[in-house]
Image (cartoon, rainbow, N blue to C red):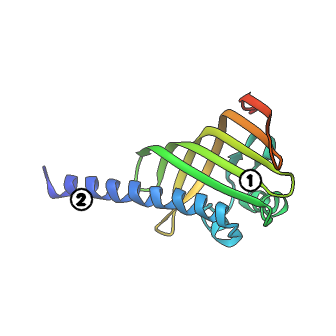
Amino acid sequence: MSSAELLQRITALEDAQAIRHLKSRYLFSCDRKDVAQMRACFADGPVDIDYGPIGQFTRADDLVEVFKRIGCHDHMVEMHHGSNPQIEVWDDQTASAKWSLEYRLINTQEHTLTLLTGYYEDGYRKVDGQWKISKTHFIPVSSVVLALADDTVKAVFAGRAAG
């Protein structure tokens, strides 16, 4: 193996690791309601975001506004668990990945617990040496919504999640 081939392989591994860190930062910033950090995960300019019922966006700033309006409240206790990354680094500027998601939301105002599973289909581009999300589509698989009362738990919905 030539030194150029070895360098190319090492770079691809480093890029894949940087993309893992980027997705982790994105999910963690959503849980922490850190708007600036969440926005920093996305590329500037046109993006392709499809979060189903939450909305479709061609600008990350439009997603941020929805995030602030519906998600950034103390009564929304969230946890995103991304796993099973399948990352493809296509070249030194573009990559894609699929990620499984397990999501939990305790809404202390409505007294509900939502459990959601699905997966992301993401695209990435390198901007000024940093990987950024340029495409993200969430495909829901299953959802359970439970109403929480002092002494009972009632299933409000359980089944295939709406997409």
Q: Residue at x 74, y 30 (%)?
A: 158
Q: Nearer the viewer, residue 108 or 55?
A: 108
Q: Is residue 145 above or below residue 70?
A: above
**Which quarter of the rendering shows the C terminus?**
top right
Q: Is residue 44 left or right of residue 1?
A: right
Q: Secondary structure at mark 1?
A: strand
Residue ranking furthest to the top: 159
Residue ranking furthest to the front: 151
Task: Answer with mark 1 or mark 2, whichever residue precedes in sequence.
Answer: 2
Q: How far from the left and from the top, in percent, is residue 20?
A: 46, 56
Q: Secondary structure at mark 2?
A: helix
Q: Nearer the viewer, residue 121 or 73?
A: 73
In this rendering, the label closer to the viewer, 1 or 2: 1
Q: Residue at x 78, y 66 (%)?
A: 74
Q: Which mark is residue 106?
A: 1
Q: Which residue is mark 2?
A: 7
Q: How far from the left and from the top, in percent, is residue 104?
A: 66, 49
Q: How far from the left and from the top, in percent, is residue 124?
A: 53, 52
